[in-house]
Amino acid sequence: MTAIAHPSHDPELDSMNLTKNTRRAAAAALAVPVLLFTAACGSDDGKGSSAATVATVEGKAGEQPKITVPKDAKAPGERATKTLIEGKGATVNKGDFVRLDYAAQAMKTGQNLGTSWMKQPGTDAKAPRTQVVGEASDQAQSQLPPKVMGAVVGQKVGSRVQIEGTAKELVGENLNPQLGIKPEDGLVWVVDIAAAKKADKKAKAEGEQAKPEEGMPEVKAEGDKAATITIPQGEKAPTDLKQQVLVKGKGAEVKAGDGLIAQYTGVKWEDGKKFDSSWDHGGATAFQIGTGSVVKGWDQALVGKHVGDRVEIVIPPKLGYEGNAQSGLDKNTLVFSVDIVGTV
């Protein structure tokens, strides 16, 4: 789970989320956790294979698919990719940020391995349904295994793609043994590509920065590194959300449901220590915003801002990780400097 990812509100899902990756990588986090893998890595090149798919998929692009697997069907030994519906949008290139929907299941048992069509429990009923935001790459830090994310490379926006293979092939050595899925078991994903956009990993907000308002921490964002955030001495942490636009951008307004491409740094108010920064994980990354996929403080502060803005946010525990002791930040007031460098 990332430093800004929102914990699940469903105790059953929480108990099933057996991933062991404690690295706070800059990655999108979904309402429904993918339970298969313990870390994100791989060596896939994003190209399709000649292997044939075995599952039958019904439904239109944009609607939750129905996946049917013939009895005793054997999964292809190498990744098999089939374009079920070809979109008319731009071609997805390696490294693009991609917004997509997915559904996944085990072939033998029909076990649901996650879907973006399920709205996160506890979120606003009027909020847009959550989709995945990830990087089209064989090394993608995403909710989906890298070989699944790699399979969208070369596909067009608007496409529905079927991806199959054994757990060993698609997930590899990072298969979570506690889930009960064996390396030879077959897995199938259906992915709808909603949008894709290339982003400069070193992008940041540009322009004259405003001085911090009274009681707000000071932010120094210089060079290609994490911002330095200084907590004002003697100031008590606020109990409500505080925010300030430090640099005003001229880009499009951020809307709920967008994939927010951001450069960010976060520190704890209590000791001023950094706990996460996109610069520490390769640069700008993307998150779903306004859908309950990230902490409430991000959703409340960043929807309605503009591309090019640098926003300072002070988030009390009730809008951060309160109640989620596993995060290690459940009692902390969080301070973020966020550069909004694009949307997807």
Image (cartoon, rainbow, N blue to C red):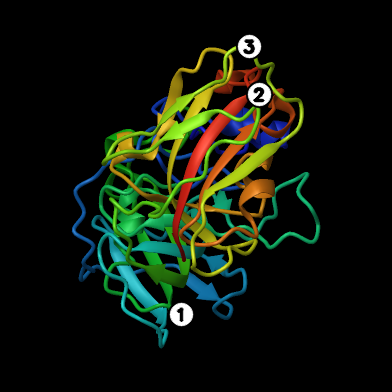
Q: Nearer the viewer, mark 1 or mark 2?
A: 2
Give the residue pinned by disc 1: 158
Q: Are marks 2 and 3 in contact (CB under 8 Å)?
A: no
Alpha carbon separation for disc pair 3 and 1: 53 Å
Circle 3 Cα neighbour tier, 10 Å, few/some/many (<14 / 14–19 / ≥20): few
Please state which amino acid type lies under the numbered disc 3. Gly
Q: Amino acid at mark 1?
A: Gly
Q: Which residue is mark 2?
A: 324
SS state under label 3 = loop
Quadrant in the rendering for residue 234: top right
Compared with 205, 327 (above or below) is above
Q: CA distance from mark 2 to mark 3?
A: 28 Å
Foreground tag (2 vs 3):
3
User: From the viewer's perspective, is the residue at label 3 or at label 1 nearer?
Assistant: 3
Give the number of the disc on residue 234: 3
Q: Which mark is residue 212?
A: none
For residue 308, say whether it is visible: yes
Q: Position of residue 325 (x, y in %)?
A: 63, 18
Q: Amino acid at mark 2?
A: Asn
User: Quadrant of residue 239 in the image?
Assistant: top right
Horizontal side of 139 relative to 313 (left or right) equals left
Give the percent coordinates (x, y) of residue 255: 62, 64
Q: Is residue 132 or residue 82 the one in the foreground?
A: 132
**Residue 11 pos. (x, y %):** 72, 31
